[in-house]
Amino acid sequence: MQARDPGARRDPAASLLVGLIVVAVIAFGGLSPTRFFAPGTWRAMAFQLPELGILTLAMMIPLVSGGLNLAIIATANLCGLVMAAVLTRLIGVASPPGAVAGAIALALSAGLGAALLVGLLNGFMVSVLRVHPILVTLGTMILVNGISIAATHGGVIGGFPPAILLLGNGTVLGVPVSLLLFGLCAAGVGLLLARTPFGVGVRMVGSNERATRFSGVNTTRVLIGVYLSSSTLCWVAALVMIARFNSARAGYAESYLLITILAAVLGGVDPFGGFGRVRGVVLALCLLQVISTGFNLIGVNPRLSEAIWGATMVAALVIARIRVRWAGRLSSPDQASTLASPGGP
Amino acid sequence: MRERLTSLGRSHEARLAVIVLAIAAFFAVEAPGFPTLANLMDLLEGRAVLAILAAGLLVVLIAGGIDISCAAVAAVSQYLVALCLIRWTGNWALALLLAAGFGAALGAVNALLIHALKAPPVIVTIATMTFYFSMLIFLTKGVSLYDLPDWFTVKVSILGVPLPVAMAAAVLGATAFLLRRVSLGRQIFGLGGNPEAARRMGCNVAGLQVFIYGFSGAMAGLAGLVQAYRVEEVAPSALIGRELDVLAAVVLGGASLTGGRGTVGGTVLGIVLLAMLHNGLTLMGVSSYLFGSVTGLLILLSLAATSVSQGRPQKGGRHAG
Amino acid sequence: MVRPLVEMLAIRRRFGGVRALSGVNLTVLPGEVHCLAGENGCGKSTLIKILSGVLAPDSGRIVLNGAEHARLTPAASQAAGVQIIYQDLSLFPNLTVEENIAFRRHVGRAGRLVRVGAMRSEAQAAMARLGVSLRLGALVRDLPIASRQLVAICRTLAADARLVVMDEPTASLTHQEADALLATIRGLRAHGIATVFVSHRLDDMMRVGDRVTVLRDGANAGTFAMGDLDRGRLGELISGRRLADAVKQPLSGSAPPALEVRSLSRGGEYEGINLAVRPGEILGLIGRLGSGRTELALTLFGMNRPEAGEILVRGRSVALDSNRAAIREGIGYVPEDRLSLGLVMPQSIAENTLVTVLGRLCGRLGLIDPQRRAETVARWMERLQVKTATAERPVMELSGGNQQRVVLAKWLATEPRVLILDSPTAGIDVGARAGLYRTMDELAALGLAILLISDEVEEVRHQAHRILVMLGGRIAGEYSPSGITDEQLREVIRA
């Protein structure tokens, strides 16, 4: 018996996504060849992808567990502000390198701490109090945004040491540091979901939490782990964001929320939970990035491209539906009664 | 009748009412200017748009769905109605009809997508919300409409109550009537309580979905109209983000995301609670920058409390079935 | 010669590769109580779904009120007066009793105001016809299950039923409640309403039925007047087995028990339970739902806490504060509800098999070793003879019998000492059952202590070495299979 990768059942042919990427490159290249194939364009894409990518990973894990994390942007912004506040308070123009390093370490820990607190709150309310993840993360989103705004009055905190900026704008052998960081996160999440007991737990919980509990899996721990890892990824994304923009603010990246869900669903994550592979999500992100940059280059209004993302989300759901219909085969009478169509409107 | 009262007494709505009264009492003492009629009427008038949106969302939640696109529908329909009113003459009846009509059509799109794609309503409505808002701002370039006809913007009071409040009251009353007294409304409850039984009992589930999301859209349309009336302009981006406020209020009021629960009374209390909090805190000089955190905290506490009180005390599955 | 109300003739139906019904006939006369008997998996549910119009037959005819149909629709079926009461009752928990009863005319019709007075009188009329009285304003979710069943029956009356099909109505009832229900069904007969009583419980059917049609493995095994049968014969027809008195003898030897329970009590569910299971022994625990047997099983598996008494595993007192603790102690539990608790249906066979032992598959860094994973899966598929081409397909594609093998594999992988099987053959066809029984014997022979919980007398008596009867939360008696017959055991349970 072949050992195929678990979680692969509803994988869109990765080849389909690669094909779409090629089509998009050709299309936009055809429309605007000199600008699209300029090295600057590809550089820009390589720098823009990581923050969206890491946030998408932060959305992916809760989705696979059968939930949703509406608070990822808010969490990322909070982490960004916390780290920015520490950095700007502790580092002056004339600070010696040792103090700078120490301050950076402190800032990172503070940011991570904030992320873990939010993740713990989410995880606790979902797993122990059994509140629906959409409502929980809605509440935390409003709370966390509220805290960010209360602390900064909507203002910006900026001005970070070069070491941080390197993270956002530096390259190693021509590859942006942030892209490497994203690659590391993607690999990590991929391994986590596909090759660890925790990952199996996440997927099983996503399909049927009660049955998974009956099999001896500590679903409370799994769900708390889901939201902790989600918010940790938000922290990493925050790091990349403040490094890139050299500032932090309460309202950054709000339009990303839909796109993270879009990338996940396009990448094969089942919106009802239980299935999803990082490989597909990464390819979907690349596709979206190419399209987004392409739109930019040919002068498509950013609002219009947002509207197109909305329409693309619907298209992604259509594809997901077709895939499910195609893959489903009835072979036992049990199924006729157990095939659960999503209940309710 | 007696058990209706006792079970009501233990209910979420009752607890909420107590909290509302307590907070009102607190502000009456501590917040200068709070307990005046003018202030209270101002408070209600400020939340009228939200209340109308909430009426629509409540129905969707009771049926077991969710509609994140309600504010976007309100914004788009508001603009379309304004265009019509500016271009052609009209009157309030026409305005109401157009608003409800545009809204219902946009809302029905949600229903068709959810039904056809068998996709989670939260994701579908986030997609339509994005599409509607972004297309609106793209096509209008973010420019507001100002020259609304005079007959529309003249400030009217009905029985001493400003028009927005009267409309909100009418809408909420109609929704309560629908949910309690009209068979369709009871079917909606049933659908939220046991979707499989609804199918088996021959309910037209697809039709119900179209009604529910269409209703939510129609309410959004009316809300957009009232918004235009209040501020005397149609700003495409004015309602961005309001869907969360609506959801917060309805959830505070006791509606559940899983369906089958919720009352108009609870929703009203939820709206009033949030409104009073913001108003009272403002009058006390508390910075408005804190409101977000307060709202968020309140929502989380309410969710926790509801969950704890509903926690199934299952002793052997027989009684809980 | 009375014209039949319903005639189903030569009905065939397949699902993929499985033949659920192969040429089945069913005829129901007006006003009769007609039992449709058969073990789980014999095709009863499929036949009923075809009658209700939810499924279409592959071939055959249905004659309803003299009109012939190739297939029915729910609307046509209901228009002819056929009402189905499913096992889950399909009530609306958040609507009131009167709204549920009068649903068809008053709530289910869109676009009208609810006429409270008319709705109330309709509900009251239905209750009066049935001879029951319930609080009309109560929410259904607040009612005990026996009351909910009455609401469901009243609903069929209010919908002008001429034929009421009840799917396993007594499965979740206590003995007294079942008595009351059977009396209610006889009341329906007095009103000229026919009832199809779908069940696998002999006692209930014999008490209430006029005629019985037996299905076995998707085919007719005969239609009889109830008076012409005795329990023994009916049991034989249903199970297809000659009642060979091949029972087991109690285990000899004096090995200490693998699992022992002393004075275990949990308020309102069970009280003063004492039992012991030795390695290699199959202890049968028989009792209806409501006897506390499922709650006891859950306690032994660590999923609820007892209030008094102790549990000993291999002589050592243990406190099971979660099912993970129970698994560590070597206890495994195969739940009754395989479809929603036993397996995670959309996930693969492999994942379902390994979910209990994931920790053991890890190499360095806490990552699952693909080699070890593949080997473990292959090993268990083979040992339990799970028939499948690949283990990466969703487990819901397997037949019921194979699914149950996956459940067993999952627990055996934990190397348990004690296995609690709760109605393990529910929903599984006869052929697969025999295989499962053989597997059970093999496991016992390997030294596993098995607690077999069931409400099927034949199953327990022929599989277990010893039998405990549980009634009303207590152990009412202990029997040796050779010292009691099937009928006598049934008497004891009813008592």
Image: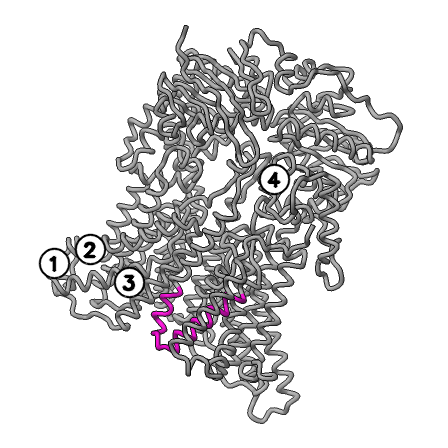
Q: Secondary structure at mark 3?
A: helix
**Residue position marked by numbered label 3 in the rendering:** B75
What type is the residue that disc 2 sits on?
Answer: Leu
* Residue A277 makes an appearance in the image: yes
**Residue position marked by numbered label 4 in the rendering:** C398
User: Which one is in front, A151 or C303?
Assistant: C303
In the displayed image of the protein, which residue is found farthest to the bottom? Answer: A94
Compared with C226, B142 (above or below) is below
Give the residues in magenta. A282-309
Label 1 is found on which chain of the structure? Answer: B
Residue C357 is situated, as x and y percent measured from the top left of the image, at 72, 50
Q: CA distance from mark 3 to mark 1?
A: 20 Å
**Looking at the image, do the residues carrying marks 2 and 1 touch, with CB atoms under 8 Å apart?**
yes
Same-chain check, marks 4 and 1: no
Inspect the magenta stretch and tell me whether residue A286 lies in it: yes
* Residue C124 makes an appearance in the image: no
**Looking at the image, do the residues carrying marks 4 and 1 touch, with CB atoms under 8 Å apart?**
no
**Residue position marked by numbered label 2 in the rendering:** B98
Of tags 4 and 1, which is closer to the observer?
Answer: 4
What type is the residue that disc 1 sits on?
Answer: Gly
**Residue position marked by numbered label 1 in the rendering:** B90
Q: CA distance from mark 4 to mark 1?
A: 65 Å
Same-chain check, marks 4 and 2: no
Of tags 4 and 2, which is closer to the observer?
Answer: 4
